[in-house]
Amino acid sequence: MTLHDAYDPDNIFAKILRGEMPAVKVYEDDAALAFMDVFPQSEGHTLVVPKGVEARNLLDMPADKLGPYMATVQKVAQAVEAALTPDGLVVTQFNGAPAGQTVYHLHFHIIPRWKDVTLGRHGSGEMADTDKLGVLADRIRMKL
Ligand code: 5GP
């Protein structure tokens, strides 16, 4: 997927947004849906995707929807921090395959970091246990 290919409405996050694929949800409002990354790079790795847009990446995002979306990214990041008390928090996103993007619906990663804990590889590794993700999602939700 280059930066200029068309939006694919059958990407996995679009399917999650439409309820066609399962996800361990953390939070939802008018602007965005937050759910647990199924291949987490650290415990509590959460994704926040904008709703109601066909934006492959940040460059595509309508400017008038960016503010409410980023407010939700911040809200969820604050809840992840409050719930899991990491030493640091990576909040990031990738634009285009050469930049590391693998799912082409805009999303921000919220990745808690702990001193002396190595970061897992991006978009690979073992699929997380759904029940364990559910426990983490509950803990984060309690801080929202
Ligand atoms: P990207 O590489 O596009 O920045 O990030 C995509 C993220 O989505 C990766 O961290 C990957 O682990 C995660 N991911 C891929 N497929 C699924 C899925 O079906 N469900 C969930 N919850 N996360 C996914």
Image: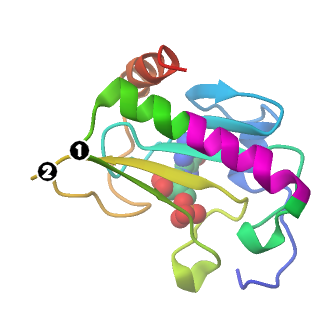
Give coordinates of residue 5: x percent, y percent: 82, 81
The local secondary structure at tag 2 comes to loop
Examine the image and state in which quarter residue 90 appears.
bottom left
Left or right of 50 on screen, residue 83: left
Label 2 sits on what residue type?
Lys
Report x, y in % for residue 95: 64, 75
Measuring 58% from the left and 67% from the top, which residue is drawn there? 102
> Which is nearer the eye, 58 or 101?
58
x and y percent of residue 113 in the render?
27, 49
The amino acid type found where label 1 is placed reads Asp
Determine which residue is flagged by label 1.
87
Using the image, determine if residue 26 lies above or below residue 17.
Answer: above
Query: Looking at the image, is 40 positioned above or below residue 140?
Result: below
Q: Residue at x 68, y 49 (%)?
A: 70
- Judged left or right of residue 121, residue 69 is right
Residue 73 magenta = yes
Q: In which quarter of the image is the N terminus?
A: bottom right
Element at badge 1? loop
Q: Quadrant of the C terminus?
A: top right
**Which residue is at a point 71% across and 28% down the rendered structure image?**
28
Could you say which disc has been placed on residue 106 in the image?
Answer: none
CA neighbours of label 1 inside 10 A, class few (<14), some (14 to 19), many (20+): few
Residue located beneath label 2 in the image: 115
Q: How many labels does the image show?
A: 2
Image position of 105 (left or right of 134):
right
